[in-house]
Amino acid sequence: MPYKIDHDRPNCIGCGACAAVAPDFWEMSAVDGKSDVKGSEREEEAGEIVRETLEIIDDQYTKNKEAADCCPVNVIHLLNEKGEKII
């Protein structure tokens, strides 16, 4: 079943937990210190990234759920194939 990562980037505090847990999917921006989803589609407003999304498959779900679970400000969400929020 396909899933989607939905990252609320403006509210990221740059703690780095996601990048530590799932470095294949997450990295810290050298520009502003916030996390970025590698290979994501980015939605911008006024030149700022406001949302990042990336489709993932079953075997990528667990690591990204760990990243979402460890986020202290809950800006990482996982959606199911219907677009419903799992976390």
Image: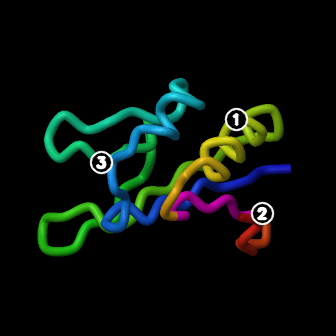
- Residue bearing mark 1: 63
Q: Is 2 or 60 nearer to us in this picture?
A: 60
Amino acid type at mark 3: Lys
76 within the magenta span: yes
Q: Secondary structure at mark 3?
A: loop
**Residue 80 numbered tag:** 2
Label located before the other in sequence (2 or 3): 3
Q: Is residue 8 left or right of residue 10?
A: right
Residue mark closest to the camera, 2 vs 3:
3
On-image quarter of the C terminus: bottom right
- Residue shown at 71%/47% (left/top)? 65
Q: Is residue 36 above or below residue 8?
A: above
Disc 1 to disc 3, C-alpha distance: 19 Å
Residue 26 locus on image (x, y percent): 47, 35
Compute the Cα span from label 2 to label 3: 25 Å
Q: Quadrant of residue 86?
A: bottom right
Q: Residues within 10 Å of mark 2 (few under 14, many from 20)?
A: some
In the rendered structure, does residue 41 fall within the stretch colored magenta?
A: no
Please rate how many residues cluster around mark 1, counting C-alpha atoms within 10 Å: few if below 14, some from 14 to 19, many from 20: some
Left or right: where does residue 31 sit relative to residue 24? Answer: left
Element assignment for label 2: loop
Q: In the rendering, which numbered label is found on residue 73?
A: none
Q: Is residue 62 left or right of residue 44?
A: right
Q: How far apart are the two marked residues, 1 and 2, measured between alpha carbons?
A: 15 Å
Residue at mark 3: 34
